[in-house]
Amino acid sequence: MSQDEIVLGTKAVVQGLETLRSEHHSLLAALLDTVSNRSLEAIELGLGEAQVIIALSSHLSAVESEKQKLRAQVRRLVQENQWLRDELAATQHKLQRSEQSVAQLEEEKKHLEFMNQIKKFDEDVSPSDEKNGEAAKDTLDDLFPNDDDHAQGPTHHSGESAAQQGGYEIPARLRTLHNLVIQYASQGRYEVAVPLCKQALEDLEKTSGHDHPDVATMLNILALVYRDQNKYKEAAHLLNDALAIREKTLGKDHPAVAATLNNLAVLYGKRGKYKEAEPLCKRALEIREKVLGKYHPDVAKQLNNLALLCQNQGKYEEVQYYYQRALEIYESRLGPDNPNVAKTKNNLASSYIKQGKYKEAETLYKEILTQAHEREFGSVNGESGKKYFHQLGGQTFAEYGSWYKACKLDSLTANATLKSLGSLYRRQGKVEAAETL
């Protein structure tokens, strides 16, 4: 017999026994002497056993149901395990390819370094070479409070320039992620940096909404990474989005708005759209002057970028005005020994050379070198370094060359100025002075 048949039979027996018990009790009163007490005990025992069988049947059914659930869970775990094995194999394959790419890039880097060592003594451009080709345009750099390198025109920064958003620091909750993006972007690992930024944007928009200053900060960072990849269209879209968010949430005169405007100007400048970049840079300057004051160092940095934009458009009167304003700010607020003073003078001298004003450029270069020497060693032979330099020239310039070699100034700015001054003398036909430098 099957289990169900046993259960049905048991239930029928129970009903019969219940009926017999009722009849037994009804007859018991009349036939008390004739009915044995043993039969009543047997009926009670039968009822108890029947109830035990029914309870056991219910328990077995529950056990069987749980068993089926566990089997289904085991099948699902087996499938997930197989999927994870496949993912692991694919990831290991990608890792092997990445390691091969890294090894190849290392070899290319060594080759480029070797080539740079070969070329480093032949970097001066002769006048004839410059006439045969169009002069290179100066490029702008990002403007942030702690970035002292922006004034040097032709330098290039990676995504790490987003460390400070023009007086608007990276929020604490984004700092770790931001540092990771910097690291990957500086290594050229954009396939990692970009997904990190996108995931952060998605999480921020879910938790804080799209119109939040932290979202704008992340948009700025991703835009700078895209710009480093020459994806200018995508970068411009993100920066415009960030600008709209910051204007809405922080106000149109917030330093973070000025930083985004400057980033847009830099982006347009890299694409050669100097006319479109100039009004953005001017608006950023107006905000900084309004919020920080006209003599704040960040204003001077913005003036440097604006001067470069005007220089690339041939607006040399405006270039001279902006550089001189920047110099006035740096010298009055940071002192004549601040590196930004020398860098701005270098930029102004470069603009003079483009105009053929070699005498003015030479004067600025000598001022830079005089200041560098006096800062390290004091005056020259007891006299003012400025006076000493202005007495040099022509045949006596060899004396200056030996003097500088004796100084042993370990300064990137001084070395760059020496190289620029040597190039200037070569343009003027002062071969001996140029060779000495």
Image (cartoon, rainbow, N blue to C red):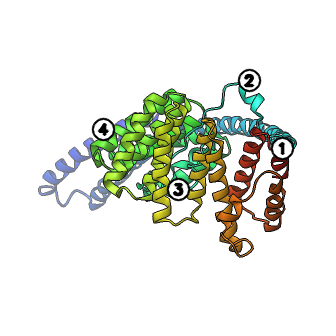
N-terminal of the pair, mark 4 or mark 3, is 4
Distance between mark 1 and mark 2 Cα atoms: 21 Å
Distance between mark 4 and mark 3 Cα atoms: 75 Å
Foreground residue among 366 and 109? 366
Q: Are the two marked residues, 2 and 4, in contact with CB atoms closer than 8 angstroms?
A: no
Position in image of residue 139 (x %, y %)? 58, 38
Q: Are the two marked residues, 4 and 1, in contact with CB atoms closer than 8 angstroms?
A: no
Residue 176 marker: 3
Q: Is residue 170 visible?
A: no
N-terminal of the pair, mark 4 or mark 1, is 4
Residue 132 marker: 2
N-terminal of the pair, mark 3 or mark 1, is 3
Mark 1 or 2: the one toward you:
1
Position in image of residue 194 (x %, y %)? 56, 38
Residue underneath mark 4: 12
Residue underneath mark 1: 431
N-terminal of the pair, mark 2 or mark 4, is 4
- Outermost residue to the top: 132
Q: Is mark 4 on a helix, strand or loop?
A: helix
Looking at the rendering, which quadrant does residue 99 occupy?
top right
Identity, as a three-letter code, of the amino acid under mark 1:
Val
Identity, as a three-letter code, of the amino acid under mark 3:
Thr
N-terminal of the pair, mark 1 or mark 2, is 2
Distance between mark 3 and mark 1 Cα atoms: 53 Å
Q: Can residue 408 be seen in this view?
A: yes
Mark 2 or 4: the one toward you:
2
Identity, as a three-letter code, of the amino acid under mark 2:
Asn
Mark 4 or 1: the one toward you:
1
Foreground residue among 237 and 32? 237
